[in-house]
Amino acid sequence: MGLTALLENEVVLVSSIDEGDLRKASRGNNLSCHFCLERIVYKHGQIKIPHFAHYTRNPDCDLSNETLEHLSGKLFMMKILPKYNTLTALTVEKIHDRRIYDVYAEMGSAKIAVELQHTVVSSESIEEKINHASQSSIHVLYVLIPGKGYLNYETSRVEGRIIVKESELYLHRTYFGRVYYTNTQSIQSAHFLPATTYVEGREWYDSSGNQNSGGGYEKNLKSRRNLQWFYVFKHPETHRLRLTMNGDVRIATLSEGVFWKK
Ligand SMILES: [Zn+2]
């Protein structure tokens, strides 16, 4: 599903066309995907958000495989980015160099892409996308949508801790110790803490009869590096983009407001 379609050789946004015209174009087989060019249809009703869907699912097209949450995430970013940033361009499902960027914005000469990720992907594919965008001077902000693998409390909870995926660890390194998540209503950033285990305190007597004691502390779990606590900052509510570099790749982060209790 997506928010854009090709109508009479023009990419149109679902919200920018009159609903009656869209239904007519849909019935008349006049809508196509601007990425894979296959037939798409207009849908509105069964689920609340008006959107476009491929007439027959195309597993090779990223726009065909999107979830409703992914779609909601894009709409949310489209709403908050202009609220907190002075943008000179803002589009959704931007195709650039055979890749689709979920949300694409410009602030003067700076280019920013926001990637929303719902299904779990490898760190290699995220790295490839960030590197590729960086070569076109695009700063990428990755935002994960929990539930379908990321931060899934039911399937990734072990001993009260959350097991994060290796792509989350990659993002944690890339974004200077932050991973951004959205429930499509707000954004929160998480910081992973090292996984530790508690070493029980104990006492013993050595061969000379002296009393010794040890333990009673938290020890890092080297063998279980992917087991992480995470700590969520609840106040990144400014959503102001910060464009920066990490090594030789361009990334975008969100500045977090500091709120003092009154
Ligand atoms: Zn397509």
Image (spheres, grey):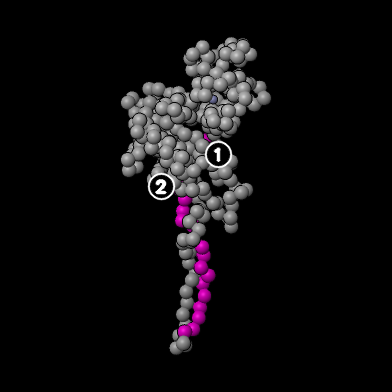
Is 231 in front, or is 249?
249
Separation of marks 2 and 1 at Cα, in angstroms: 20 Å
Q: Is mark 1 within 8 Å of ligand 1?
A: no
Could you say which quadrant of the image residue 91 lies in? Answer: top left
Q: Which mark is residue 173?
A: 2
Say which residue appears at 58% left-offset and 19% top-offset: 39
- Mark 2 Cα shell of 10 Å, populated few (<14), some (14-19), many (≥20): few
Is residue 141 left or right of 24 when viewed as pictured?
left
Vertical arrangement, residue 18 with respect to residue 71, above or below: above
Could you say which quadrant of the image residue 104 lies in? Answer: top left
Say which residue appears at 41% left-offset and 47% top-offset: 173
Q: Which residues are magenta?
A: 185-206
Which residue lies under the disc numbered 1?
Answer: 119
Q: Position of residue 155 (x, y in %)?
A: 61, 49
Dot 2 lies on which element? helix
Mark 2 or mark 1: which comes first in sequence? 1
